[in-house]
Amino acid sequence: MSTIYNIFVINKSGGLIYYKDFGSIAKLDTNDSLRLASVWHSLHAISSQLSPVTGCTGIELLEADTFDLHCFQTATGTKFFVTGETGAAGVDLLLKSIYELYSDYVLKNPFYEVEMPIRVELWDLNLATLIRQRERTSTGK
Amino acid sequence: MFGLLFSLKSFTAKLDPINGDNAGQAGKGCSFHSFKTNTYKLSYFETAAGVKFVLVTDPRMGDLREALRNIYSNIYVEYVSKNPIYTPGQPFRCELFESTLDAYVKSL
């Protein structure tokens, strides 16, 4: 009972560099996913400005009525965020694993240009495996 | 702050993976009830009339939806809405509201 709906990766200037749908009922079209990614980038920035204490690094978890959004920002400003079912556990760890896959298969790929859209087959494959594994362990099959 | 909340609301309405985009219709679509950063947690509650309540707390606080609902129905409605000299939509300064709110928030 912890489905992942979407995965987004955005670069440090807010441009969408990767988007994948894992079975949400209402699909987003390409324009919407690009727009929402940059909206998220700005919301993330504003939220860290609004903090009553210093040292805020932006939204980590957004709880909406029908889904939860977990966000992880790397030291270089790349943001990974996933939407999943409300109350899904272990998504923070999942984000870390996604980051690991990103550094292994995308950043170490000599043909990949940083900040550009990700078109790397191994990353795609491994990401799909990771999500499938997660679904399997959470449903206990 | 208002801009952030407004944008977050249209963002969640658009991103809603279950029901899709209802953002155009007022009061419909998927809203959000809280977000959490490493330094604070912001809980949000919007009434049917569009009055918004925002509670900024320590990130370790649990679910505050009940608390906000309580602030609305037992404190705001009692002391502000039912106040005969209060004009809806205007800023209010109401001693009873503030003292009860103070006491309630301290008890959380």
Image (spheres, coloured by chain):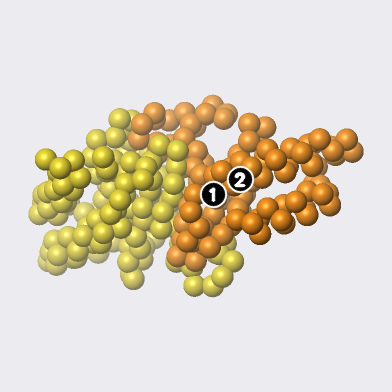
Chain colours: A yellow, B orange
* Tag 1: amino acid: Leu
Marks 2/1 in contact by CB < 8 Å: the verdict is yes
Quadrant holding the N terminus of chain A: top left
| Chain under disc 2 | B
Farthest-out residue, right: B85
Residue A131 in view here: no
For badge 2, the amino acid type reads Leu
Q: Residue at x 61, y 50 (%)?
A: B54
**Residue that numbered label 2 is attached to:** B68
Q: Quadrant of residue A132?
A: top left
Asked if A71 appears above or below B33 in the picture, the reply is below
Residue at x 39% of width, y 28% of height: B19
**Is residue A77 shown left or right of residue B72?**
left
Judging from the image, what secondary structure is the residue with disc 2 in?
Answer: helix
Front position in the image: A61 or A73: A61
Q: Residue at x 49, y 42 (%)?
A: B32
Can residue B57 be seen by looking at this rendering?
Answer: yes
In the figure, is residue B41 to the left or right of B47? left
Q: CA distance from mark 2 to mark 1?
A: 6 Å
Q: Chain of mark 1?
A: B
In the rendered structure, the answer to whether residue B85 lies left or right of residue B57 reads right
Q: Which residue is mark 1?
A: B64
